[in-house]
Image (cartoon, rainbow, N blue to C red):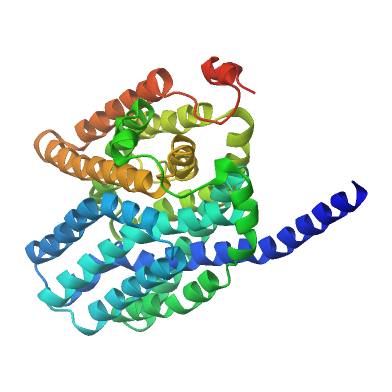
Amino acid sequence: MKLLGGFRRLEQRQIVRHAAPGKRGLDGLNAFVAGMRTAFGAFVPAYLAGQGWTQAQIGLVLTAETVTSMLAQVPGGAFVDVTRRRRLVLGIAILGAAGAALVIAALPMQLPVLLALVVHALAGAIIAPGIATVTVAMVGRRDLGERLGRNVQYASIGGGAGAALMGLAASAVSERAVFVLAAVLVIPALISLWSLHPRPLRRRVAAAPTDAIEPQGSVRMLLADRRMQVFAACVTLFHFSSAALLAVAAAEITRRAGMRAGALIAAFVIIPQVLVAVASPWVGRLAERIGRRPLLVVGYASLPLRAALFAVVDDPYLLVPVQLLEGVAAAVFGVMLPLVAADLTRDSGRYTLSLGALGLAGTLGAALSTTVAGLIATGFGVKAAFWTLAAAGLVAVLVVALAMPETRPGPARDRTRPWWRLS
């Protein structure tokens, strides 16, 4: 028995030794990929406008990217589920995103840019579930909450640092340099990816049935799961309430603040990122202690409060601290989405497929948000759009509080107790 115990302690030390570099590799992977993909946000329309594109032309290619992303979410997740070369597939997707950035920099013409954004959307449908499934393989599901919190933390750090560096590059060199810098970031991203060593951990993963990630259940069973349906509705409502808020506010901030609007909008973006970076690991640890639903309620409750404050506060400077609420929502949602998806697919193994389905739900919510809020702001004013988003956020809170079950693994009695009594 003593000899057996000695072998077990030795094996545990070997796992820890291999897992420590893996954690650092996951940190770098999340940070560099997030930094690289920052270029495909607000920098794209600004760069294309500087190249003489009309708003209609810019809108066309961005719409093509959005539609491609919606169509690719579920197939992308299903593909990551069935492939056995997940790191290779993830690496190819990251290279695809970098190649898209280079095409945009070198050929700012309509067809090349359209194809580049479509490739970026396809790559994005692989990158997010790919990182999630590599994370499960590295740490197992027992420590998944804390590790996902760390993923979100480093993605937030990478996104913020990437935005700052790209802003400096655009100012000091040109807007074309933004996309060259994004392509360069593929090098440390791939180094981080290949520094992961899931092979020494396979014995640990295989030893725990709850850690199995190979697909076993049917797609129909997954999509027919009532818990998955409720959570998909929650994801849609989250994005519907939050996606258009800053977009609607940006024009009003520009009108009121004039030349200082750029600095204000930058503060609106940076403040939530800082809070997400600080709070995400704590959210992951707390989710393992008290469950998922209490944190979901807190995160979702910030949605109607933030939209209502945007509606009643006229001074744009006073709205800057309100953005802390966006940080609360982003920290909770960023950790809870992959964590709840892992809970719901413990028996089926359809983890990345569920992430694709939830990604599709979120994309639909965001598209509806910008469309509906834009129409209401044009027809009835900005405040009416804010109140509409606040009402949607309140509905989201009610759905989470009343319909969303607790998904944290544990005794059956724990899942049936009221969420405020879970410990």
Report the side of 112 relative to 263 (left or right).
left
Residue 254 position, x and y percent, is 26, 53
- Looking at the figure, which quarter contains the C terminus? top right
Where 389 sits versus 78, above or below?
above
Q: Position of residue 43 (x, y in %)?
A: 29, 67
Residue 274 appears in view: no
Please provide percent x and percent y for residue 23. Answer: 62, 61
Q: Which of these two is toward me, 252 or 46?
A: 46
Q: Residue furthest right?
A: 2
**Which residue shows up at 39% across the image and 49% down it?**
352
Q: Residue at x 57, y 62 (%)?
A: 27
Q: Is residue 112 left or right of residue 105?
A: left
Using the image, determine if residue 332 lies above or below residue 401: below
384 w.r.t. 123: above or below: above
Tell me if residue 187 can be seen: yes
- Asked whether, in this view, residue 372 is left or right of residue 144, the answer is left
Q: Position of residue 47 (x, y in %)?
A: 23, 73
Please count the marks in the image. 0
Residue depicted at x 27% and y 37%: 240
Q: Is residue 14 left or right of residue 409?
A: right
In the image, 396 versus 217, the foreground residue is 217
Pick whichever, 300 or 284, lies toward us. 284
Front residue of 41/5: it is: 5
